[in-house]
Amino acid sequence: MSISPTNKKVSEDLIIRQVNRRDLPDLEWDGEYIFYRRLYKEIFENACNGKAILWVVEINGSGLIGQLFVQLHSPRRELADGNQKAYFYAFRIKEPFRGYGIGSQLMETAEEDLNKRNFIKIALNVSKENPTALRFYKNHGYKVIAHEPGRWFFFDHLGKRREVNDPSWRLEKSIQ
C-alpha cells in the first residue's frame, strides 16, 4: 500500500486516510448510522468539490473504526470560512477501539493537514450531554467559546426530515 499525504500508516494495521466513494456504506457502521446515508453522500460530494475533507481510520481485519469530517466552507462563517477557519464534526471512534490514542492520532492528522493548508483555527461543537468528549477536546487544546443551540435537520435514508436538538458547546483551537 502506498503512503501519500492523504494516507498515513500509523502502525502495521492502522491507517488514517481520506474517504473514497467505496467507503460510504461503511460510514453507516453496520447500520447504526444508516439514517445518515443521504447526508454522507452529500458530504462526500462536498469533499469532491473542495468544501470538506473526510478522514477515516481503518484497521486490518476490522474495517473502518473511526471518522472525522472537516468542513472548510460553511454559510456560518464563524464555523468555517474556507480560508482561515475550519469546522470538525462527526468525530467518532468505535467503542472497542477507544482509549488507545486512535482518536488523538486522527485529530492530529486532520490538524496537521489544515495547518499545511494555512488554516489558523478549528471550531467544533460538543454536546453538553457528553462530558467525556468535552474533556478530550479540552485536553487537546480546545477552549469553550460559546453556547450552541444544536438545532439542525437532515433527510434520512428514507427521505424523512429529521430534526436534531442537541444543545452544545462551541470550542476553538488555534493551530498556528
Image: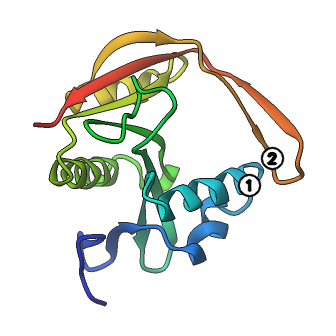
Identify the coloring: rainbow
**For the N terminus, which image quadrant?**
bottom left
Q: Residue furthest left?
A: 176
- Residue 33: tell me if it is visible: no
Q: Is residue 109 left or right of residue 17?
A: left
Q: Is residue 145 left or right of residue 30?
A: left
Secondary structure of residue under mark 1: helix
Number of other residues with Cα within 10 Å of mark 2, as a class: few under 14, some 14 to 19, many 20 or more: some
Q: Residue at x 45, y 49 (%)?
A: 69
* Distance CA(mark 1)–CA(mark 2): 6 Å
Q: Position of residue 60 (x, y in %)?
A: 42, 79
Q: Quadrant of residue 31?
A: bottom right
Q: Position of residue 42 (x, y in %)?
A: 64, 55
Tell me: residue 132, above or below residue 8: above
Q: Quadrant of residue 87?
A: top left
Q: Is residue 154 left or right of residue 83?
A: right
Q: Residue furthest bottom?
A: 1
Number of other residues with Cα within 10 Å of mark 1, as a class: few under 14, some 14 to 19, many 20 or more: some
Q: Which residue is mark 2?
A: 156
Q: Position of residue 10 (x, y in %)?
A: 23, 69
Q: Residue at x 29, y 24 (%)?
A: 172
Name which residue type carries label 1.
Arg
Of the numbered discs 1 and 2, the one sitting upstream in the chain is 1
**For the C terminus, which image quadrant?**
top left
Name which residue type carries label 2.
Asp
- Residue 130: tell me if it is visible: yes
For residue 5, which numbered disc appears in the image? Answer: none
Q: Which residue is mark 1?
A: 38
Q: Residue at x 88, y 48 (%)?
A: 159
